[in-house]
Structures are given as C-alpha cells and as structure tokens.
Amino acid sequence: MQKPTELEVFIAVSLQRSDDCERIPIDPEDSRPGQGLDHRENQWMAVHVKSQGPGGKVVVCAHRYQQWIRDNQLVLGRCFILKQNLTVEDTRTFCRNRGSSKEMLGYCQQGVSAAFTKDNNYIMFSGPGAYDWRGFALDLGTNLLQKDKQVILAGAPCSNLSGEVLILKPDENQRSLIIAHILHGPGLASSFDYSLSVMDLNADGWEAGIGGAVYVYINRQNGRDWDQLQPDILTGNKDSMFGLAVAKTGDINHDGYNDFAVGAPYDNDGYGAVYINFGKTSHFSQKDYQVLRGEAHNIKFFGYSLAGNMDIDGNGYPDLAVGSLSDSVLIYRAKPVISIEKSLTLTPNEMNFQERDCQKGHCIITAESCFSYTTYPETYNPKLKILYKLNADEQWGQEGQLSRLVFQSNHEGNIVLAKQGEKRCVQRRLRLRADTKNKLTEIPVSVSVSLPPQTLSRSSLPILQPALNNLQPRKITAKLMFFDPDCGSDNICQSNLQLQYSFCSKDQHLDFCSPLAREDGVAVIFPGSENTALKITVTNPGGDDAHLVQLVANFPESLPLSSVFHKPDSNVNVQCDVDESKTRAECNLGNPFKRNAEISNMGRPLKSFASVTLNIWWPKENKEFKWLLYLLRITGPNNQSIPCSPASEISPLKHAQETCDNELKCVELKCPLRAADKTTVILHSRLWSSTFVEVNFDCFLFLCMEAGALGGEFSIRLPERVEALSGLCVHIPCSFDTKEYFDKDLNEVPTGIWLKDGIDMEINTVFNSKTPEENKFQGEMIGNLSMKNCTTAFNNIKLWDSGDFYFKIKTLWPLEFTYTTPVFMNVQDAPRVSFSNYSCNNTQDLIVCSCEIDGNPAPTLEWHLSGQNTSSTRNEAVTNTTIRSFISIPNSFKDILILQCIGSNKVGNDKQIRYFKPQDAAEGGNVSSALIGVAVGAIVFLMLAGAFLYVRRVYLLQNGRGNKDVINFSDIVSVKSNLQI
C-alpha cells in the first residue's frame, strides 16, 4: 500500500542483473477533490497480477479502487491491461454504473482474481462483493469435463456459509454460462476455495482442481461424476492460514508431472511458509512436500501470494515468486535436476566358502561400479563431479559384528563426468574374512552417490549448480551369494538333525557309562551316585549341511553341572560355554555340521569343583637365588580372588617373568578351580628391579647370520632365519638405510608391511602398521620407521606360521617398491597326539590301533601298554614333522588294558590314553560319546529326602537356519533318598 500523495506504480523485475528493476507507472493521477468520482488512495494496486507469458499481455488489478457518488462510497475495483512493453493499453471497470447497492455490484471489488482464457482471446475478472459476496477466486481449464472444452472454476468462500466451487461451462444456445457441477465446502466458515488453481497433476491428460483449504480433486473419471469425487485433503498447522494462496508452478523437477505451491502466511509464528507439492499418479499426503520458510529471510507473512510456472533465468526449469506483507518478494529459481544412472557388478557373485583359499582368507571379490548421468535439457552438459561410496555387509556391522567382507583399498572417492551419456567405471577389491561364521545368508554390497557441497557465488545471479533427482534412489545393492556343494541344487540346506539322550552312571576312569536304574519307567538317582551324567548324541543322517548348529541345555539349580565334555577325536569342532550358575550350557556343534556327522559327549565328570587343583610352577628365583618374579595376586573369572597355597608366596607389596627350567628356582602353587567346563586363572606379578637390569627377558628369539637387501638408494639389514616357539611372541630385528634425499619421505608417516610366502600385496600381506585391525598377524612395529628402525614383534605365533617373510617400507615413490630377500621363520612346537576311539578297529584276533603325532622338530613316538613299552609296532613318516604309528594287540586279555601313545621332542611332550575292557574284543566296533556331567552332592540328598529333582529342558538348534526345537526333559530323572531326617 502507499500514501495518498504517492504515485501508483508497478515494479517489474527481469533478474538479468541485480539492478535490472524498473518502476512502471500504472495510475499516476491523484484522486479528484471533493465529491469527485475517483478515489485511488489505498486502492491496493497490483493486488493481483496475471501474465499471458512471453510476448503476451499483463493484467494488473486494484480491487479497492472507489467511486464516490453523493453519499455512496462504492468499492468497485478495476484492472489495467498492459501491452508487452508494460505500457497501459486499456482500463476495465465492469462494475461501474451497474447498480450501487451491496445486493448488486456496489461492493464489487473487481480484480481480487483474474485469468486469461487458454486461447488468450478473453480475460475474466472476479468480483467477490458482487450480489452480496457471491464470488471470489477463479481459474480456467480445458480438460475438466471434456477434452479441449473450456470450463471456468469460480470459488465462492461464503456461499451457503461454508463455501462452494462452481464449475461453469458455456451455454451453446446463449451467450451465458451455466452451472455444470457444484463442489461443496466441508462446514460452516471453512472458507472453502478461497483460492483456486487448475492443472494436470498425474499426466493423464485430464485436469484436476485445487481449492484453498486445501482440497485436491483428481479427475479420475474422465470428466464424469465430479459431484461424487472424494478429494485428497491437505491440512496445515493451526491458525497458519494454510491454503490462503494456491498456485501452479509447472514441472519443477521435470519428472513429467505438474507441481503446485500452497501458501501459509501465518505459519511458524507469523513468519509464514510455502509448501511445494509434487505431482504424481497416487494420492497426495502431508509428507510429500518441500517447505520454503520466511523465517530464514526474516520476512513476516511469507506466502501471502504466489506466482509460478515462469522460467525467469532461462535454464529450462520454472521458477516461483513468493509475496509477503513485509514489502518483500522472494524469487526461488529451480535448479537443474540430475539423474545418475548407477550399476554394480560383483565378480564372482557366488562363493563356496569350503574352498581352501576362502578358509585362509584369500578369497577376493571385485566390485565394479559404473556411472553416467542424464538431465534436462539435452543441451545442458555440465562437468559433473560425483561422490561415491561403497559399503559391504552394513546390517551385519550395525548389529555389532565385523563385516564379512573387507575392502582392500579405499571404498569411497569421486569421479568426473564431462557430459551427459558419458559412462565411467571404478573397481574395488574385497576380501572374504577367514573367520566368517555366517556362511549361509548373502552379503549385500552397495554403492551410493552424492554431489559435492555447493558454495554460493558472490554474484547477484549465480549459475545454479544441479541437484540430484530425489525420486531416484541414491543407493543400489548387489549381493554375494554363498553356495554349499553339500546342499541341494536350490542351494537350500535341508538338514536332518537328530538328538538322542540318556542318563547314566559313569565310572571316573572309563570312557563309557552304565544306564541308571529305573522305577516305573523313570531313571532314578540314588544317594551316593555322584558320577551321574547326561549323554547327548547329535547326528545328521543323510541331511544337507546344517549351519550355525547350537545345543542349549538348561538344568535346575538343585542339579547343577559339574563339567561338560565332548568326544575329543570327533571331526566336529565343539565349543561349550557354561554360565556362572552352572544351570545352562551352550555348545556350538560345528559350522557347518556335515552330512552324516555325529557328535556326542564322552568324558570324565568332576566329582566336585573343590577337588580340582591346578599346579603352577612359578619362577621365583634364578640359580643364583636372585629374585625373578614377585606374585602380587591370583584371580579367576570376573577378577575374583583364588585362595592358592602357600599364601606366604603371594604378596601385594612384592613386584616381578621367565620360563621354569633347570636354571631357575620355581615354587609350586596349588589353586582350586571353581568353574564348570573351563575357567581362567590370572597371575599378577611385578618384575624384580635388579633382575630387570641384569637379565634381558623379552620375546623368544633365535637368530642366524644377518642378510641384507642392497640397492643403490636403499639397503636393509635382517637375519636370514628366525627361530620361534609356538604360542609365544617373536622379535624380528630390522633396520635400513636410504639416501639423504629420501629422509624427508620418512617423515610423511611411513608404513611398514610384512608379506608371507610371496610379494603380492593383495594376497600375501599379513601385517600393515597403519591398519592393525585388519592384520592376519597380530603384533606391533616396535621400531621407529622415521629413525630407520623396522624391528617388529609378532604375538602368539603358531606352527603353521612358518615360512618366508618379506618386508616392505611404503612412503612416496620410489620407496613405494622396496622389498627384502626372504627371511625364513621356523616355528617350533611341542608334539600333538591324535589318538581317538575311531583310531582302533577290532578283528576276531586283534585290536589294531593307529596314532599320529606332529610337532617341530619332528617328535619321537612310543607306545605304552598297561605302563610297559611295547615293540610290536610299525612307524611311518607322513611329513617332515608328522609320524604315524600302528600297534596290534591280541584280544585275549582278561583285565582292563591301558594303552598310551606318547610323543616328545625338545620343546615338550604329549600323550593320549585309551582303556579297553575284555568285552570290547567280543563286541567290536567304535564307541563315540560325550558327557554333560551332573554333580549331585550329599547335602542335596540330606535336604531332599523323598523329594524329586528334574532336569528341565534341553534346546537344540535343529535345522540349517538356526531355528530352535524344544525337547522337554521334565519327569525324566528323579532323585530319591532313603535317609530319614
């Protein structure tokens, strides 16, 4: 609005430059004095502006223009028609001299809304005050009732006290309009259709009507049954005036559907907001919009008026003007929309984990991602930088577990596309972890894209950077599938897991147990039957491989576990954990549990926990009686103290490590064990200070002569051979020299890399000082590479770690390609004896057993039969470090035989024992079983005279996908006592 003395002007903006604005005089004359006709003060010039588009005309209205005639002040309103050059061509005041009362056209207020017909031959004006407030907003459509037939939508917010929309069509016989349909408002004072707009929202060729409130009428009946249409209702925040302005914006994102904007000028505490709704074929909802807010620009009543479907900057995308009641108009320019075409290919896309390379962690997968882009118009070809990121096994990582695939190099980066249609690809290599447990479900690998953050230019009208198409997924996924050759052709493992159980009494020294006595079909435990066991056998006869098989057994508190054993010579790797209350055991039975595999528990149960003692030889003094180690304390699980004896050897005030041999003076400690299947004993000590000065004790290390890899610019010094002990750590001393001009490269955070049995970085790398979490060998680079010291310590070396090792230092070129000659590590290990029940076969006359021992150096093997050496054996060398031996025993013995297979070398010794009963010769065959023992103490029987104890439940993960089947052991075992209390 303006003061009375101001000229009426209209400001035109072309936005080609920051100062490219011009004040256009529309009605420069002042009001006439006295009882004159024209009163222009506060006439709200440009309350509504409509353009025919480029090259067309513009209508500008002032709906509060007045005409004073005698005592009547008529609010007629008027509109100006401007030429293409924005000069006034004509003035239209159709309410003048057509009745001065409010029941007629005296309060017409022409110009609140105006519209050009689609053929641009006619212009229409609304007069909301005409005929006692019967009209307001209007718009036109050509595909509402019939194709290419012009129809007018007229809004009447006060009609019938709730608002109505009249759909008017020309009467073919008369020059007038007739009502085709009426859309009714929802209720009293709803201001239904305060604003109107017509457009095709779903690209079906038929136009829809949008009325302020906001109601969206989708024309799904090809112009029929408008009275029966149910609108999609969009509502804004309370008191926001949501729907005060509605405008078509055109296809902002070029997805093929027209979009529309809804103003809410009182939203957000009066700052206002505009909601952009994108066209589509489905229904509209409150969630599918983009919001523009006036608060970001400190403008009040933002969204009071809207004008769209204009391409102001000429980039091919329609822009939007938003008016306010704060003397400000904001122009929003639409960014070009980029659609990125993505592809992701895995090679191979199937993996058999049973292959040897996979089990060693050498299975490599290549992921190839390709990118191209399209946009509108086709002539728009910006140089586009795309950011990409590859991820593997994301869900697995979100669940707190390590991803099963590890990227061998950086998994994110950027790529530049010069124009539309250009395609570029990147490749990344991934390694399948050797310790992968889930070998059944596929591993998803995904690639996502984004654009770099945009910086605003300081120019007044900067070139807009493109935006990604929000209707296109940012991420695509490919899947690495596992297949098991031991499963069906459909790669679905149909296992046949079966469980058998029985309660028995087990002799402490024998690997078999006798069935319990039964009364009325129920197994009974009598007082004194302390060695009671639950024998469980799990088989998979004829079934496919079963993955992640788990056995869960629950026991009552009155019948706790004393131990859990499994058959040691079984081909299935069984691992059991027992909770602290000794009432629950969880056993992993192999992954996979193979076809026709069998696992059962056979072992010697512990009579009580207190009866088990661990003897520890502790290096207290050396041969000169100098202190070596002070014992501070001894603890078990959860840092609980263990009362070892003699207590005088344990002092928290003393401090001081070395191995016990003939050179040292050791003290024997006896510690009671209180766990069920396994436990932990931790000995805390401190090194005696004077010993620390006199004796250098570190990782195990034998060195042969040094060798060096020489070059003109790089030389390195390493031993030719390193001797190590299995289970300990080993030091490899290492140093190198370079030319002085390379010294600056060593300050750029150099990387030390060890490779084993080859120099292929992808396959043979076992240690990288920069990525310790991914190393196959755990240890640390204890030397300072910047000081040319590459000494390295490896922890927990195993026998199979023997081999040739190469060292590489990696900085900048040319130190990128430095290697050594091989350094051989020889890992010595104590013998390991493999001697199981399956190792023996019975014939009519003989029992023939075999035993296999491996170790480094090659061990010697001896047979002891009932404590005596025997010579009726035959030995053969399997490898340089493995010996296999056979023994034949006549089956005519009368007493229990004890057969021992003993192996020894300079590192240590090992033995396995088997017992034979006289009936074994007659029965023949093999026995494979394992025991979950149940400790029943005398106190239980005294306290529970005549009572019964039950083993409650055992759960078995029965099929190849980990579902739990329940076997209820209730009422299987009863405990009786004949004692009287």
Image (tube, rainbow, N blue to C red):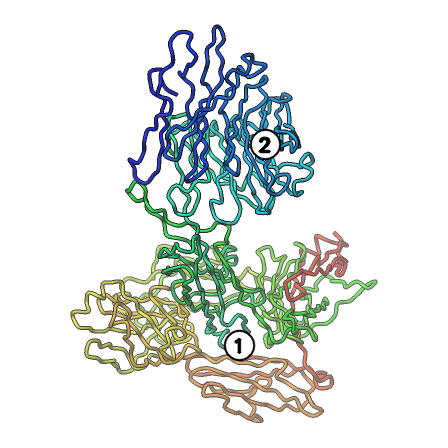
To which quarter of the image does residue 810 belong?
Answer: bottom left
When the figure is inspected, residue 950 is found, relative to residue 202, above or below; the finding is: below
Residue that numbered label 2 is attached to: 153
The residue carrying pointer 2 sits among few (fewer than 14), some (14 to 19) or many (20 or more) residues within 10 Å by Cα, namely: many
Q: Could you say which is closer to the camera, residue 949 or residue 596? A: 596
Question: Outermost residue toward the right?
Answer: 520
| SS for callout 2 | strand
Residue 355, labelled with which disc? 1
Can residue 394 be seen from the camera position used here? yes
Q: What is the three-letter code of the residue carrying label 1?
A: Glu
> Number of marks in the image?
2
Q: What is the three-letter code of the residue carrying label 2?
A: Leu
Q: Position of residue 876 (x, y in %)?
A: 52, 92
Left or right placement of residue 969 versus residue 200 in this view: right
Q: Could you say which is closer to the camera, residue 582 or residue 262? A: 262
Q: Position of residue 273 (x, y in %)?
A: 46, 33
Residue 254, labelled with which disc? none
